[in-house]
Image (cartoon, grey):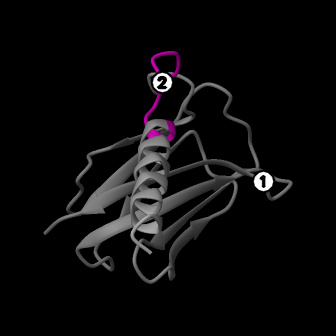
Amino acid sequence: MKKLLPILILILFFSFQSSAQTSKPGPESDGQDRIVKMFPNPATTYINFDLQKNYKTGMTLSIFNGILGKKMYESSNVPSRITVDLNDFNRGVYIYHLVDASGKIVESGKFQVSR
């Protein structure tokens, strides 16, 4: 049992280290290849989504509560710029998905609502 504990600690250490390294954006991406630019973040009363390069018509924007996973907002055929009213959103973290016409998630991200 005493030999097993250090081995488990090493496995946990390396698994956390490798997951932390893969979640960081690399210097080659720098967020430049993202389609959605959103502001302000954190938001209070509204949030703007600007669809940048690679924008195609027929996309759907969905926003989910980050804790409960409840769908809070959905808009089909989104224009290149859309403003979402946050009056019905509680304080917290929210996740957005930009989905193309075939149902594939093109981009996903998160933003914070603070009041």
Instruction: Report how far apart the C-alphas of labels 2 and 1 lie in the structure.
Output: 24 Å
Q: Which residues are magenta?
A: 22-29
Q: Is residue 95 above or below residue 80?
A: below
Work out whether residue 79 or residue 6 is closer to the camera in this orientation and state it: 6
Q: Earlier in the sequence, mark 2 or mark 1?
A: 2
Q: Is residue 83 above or below residue 34?
A: below
Quarter containing the N terminus: bottom left
Disc 2: which residue? 26
Q: Are marks 2 and 1 in contact (CB under 8 Å)?
A: no
Relative to 106, 28 lies left or right: left
Q: Amino acid at mark 2?
A: Gly
Considering every residue shown, the one lying at the far left of the view is 115
Q: Amino acid at mark 1?
A: Lys
Residue 25 is a magenta residue? yes
Q: Is residue 28 above or below residue 54?
A: above
Work out whether residue 14 or residue 87 is closer to the camera in this orientation and state it: 14
Q: Main secondary structure of the magenta part?
A: loop
Quarter containing the C terminus: bottom left
Q: Residue at x 23, y 53 (%)?
A: 42
Work out whether residue 18 or residue 60 is closer to the camera in this orientation and state it: 18
- Mark 1 burial class by Cα count in 10 Å: few <14, some 14-19, many 20+: few
Residue 11 pos. (x, y %): 49, 54
Relative to 87, 21 lies left or right: right
- Mark 2 burial class by Cα count in 10 Å: few <14, some 14-19, many 20+: few
Disc 1: which residue? 104
Residue 77 pos. (x, y %): 69, 54
Residue 29 pos. (x, y %): 52, 22
